[in-house]
Every structure is written in structure tokens, then in C-alpha cells.
Amino acid sequence: MAPHPQDAVQSHSLEDPESFWANQATQLHWHKKPSQTLKKTSKRLKDGVEHPHWTWFPDGEISTTYNCVDRHVANGHGESNAIIWDSPVTGSKERYTYSQLLQEVEALAGVLREEGVKKGDVVLIY
């Protein structure tokens, strides 16, 4: 039996993670493209212990929300399903298109802005 294509992808990710992730990064929209994929340094803890530290795409700027939602609308896929909720427990079903999801995300962003949340703030929604 021939190996599954996913096996080659997994092997590449394990054997050469820097090359693998550099390739994956080309599939995303970057507000600022990174100049390097991986930066290896070391960090020293307060007790003097030193350990390796890796930073992926250290100078890149990216928006997860833009990549997950906005770009699909911008590329003409606004009416495609973004989320399909199908609960066999409750029997409820809902569908959200990318356009509908973008409206919900923008509304939540507005609420967070009104609450004083700024770029760089960490927000936990439970």
C-alpha cells in the first residue's frame, strides 16, 4: 500500500521544521512579511539556568482573524459556509457564511474597543 500523502507532510515537518513552516507561511496573508522563519536564541532564568529559545517569524505581523475570515470575503467567498453547527444532542443546526461571521466579528471588536481594549491587550472570553 502506498504511503498516505499526509505522511510526507508530517515527515517534512519533523525533519526540517524551518523549511516546512516557511512554506506554510506563504499560504497566509501577512501585514508585514517576516524576514526570517526561525530565530534561535537562549534565555537565562533568574536561577541562572540557560535554555534554548525559538521565535517563529520574529518580525512578521499577521492577523489570525483576517486570515480566517476577512480574506475569504475579500476573495469573493463571502456566501460560502464558514461555520456549520450541527448538534445531534439538541437537534439544532446553524450555518454562518463568511460574510455573516465577519459582521459578528466586527460587532464584537466594536464592543471590545468600547470597553477600552487596545492593540496588544490580552483578552480572555469565557
Image (cartoon, grey):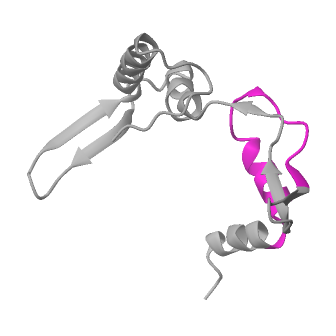
**Closest to the observer: 68 or 44?**
44
Residue segment shown in magenta: 15-40
Residue lying at 37% horizontally and 37% vertically, measured from the top left: 125
Most extreme residue toward the bottom, as rendered?
Answer: 1
Image location of residue 86, percent across then percent down: 21, 49
**Closest to the observer: 32 or 92?**
32
Quadrant position of residue 111: top left
Q: Quadrant of the C terminus?
A: top left
Most extreme residue toward the left, as rendered?
Answer: 90
Image location of residue 124, percent across then percent down: 43, 38
Q: Is residue 26 found inside the magenta-colored segment of the image?
A: yes
Image location of residue 32, percent across then percent down: 79, 26
Image location of residue 43, percent across then percent down: 85, 57
Q: Answer left or right for 40 relative to 102.
A: right
Residue lying at 82% horizontally and 31% vertically, measured from the top left: 33
**Closest to the observer: 85 or 57?**
57
Q: Answer left or right for 102 relative to 16.
A: left
Residue lying at 80% horizontally and 60% vertically, measured from the top left: 45
Q: Is residue 61 above or below residue 111?
A: below
Q: Quadrant of the N terminus?
A: bottom right
Q: Answer left or right for 58 relative to 64.
A: right
Residue lying at 41% horizontally and 28% vertically, measured from the top left: 98
Q: Is residue 94 above or below residue 46?
A: above
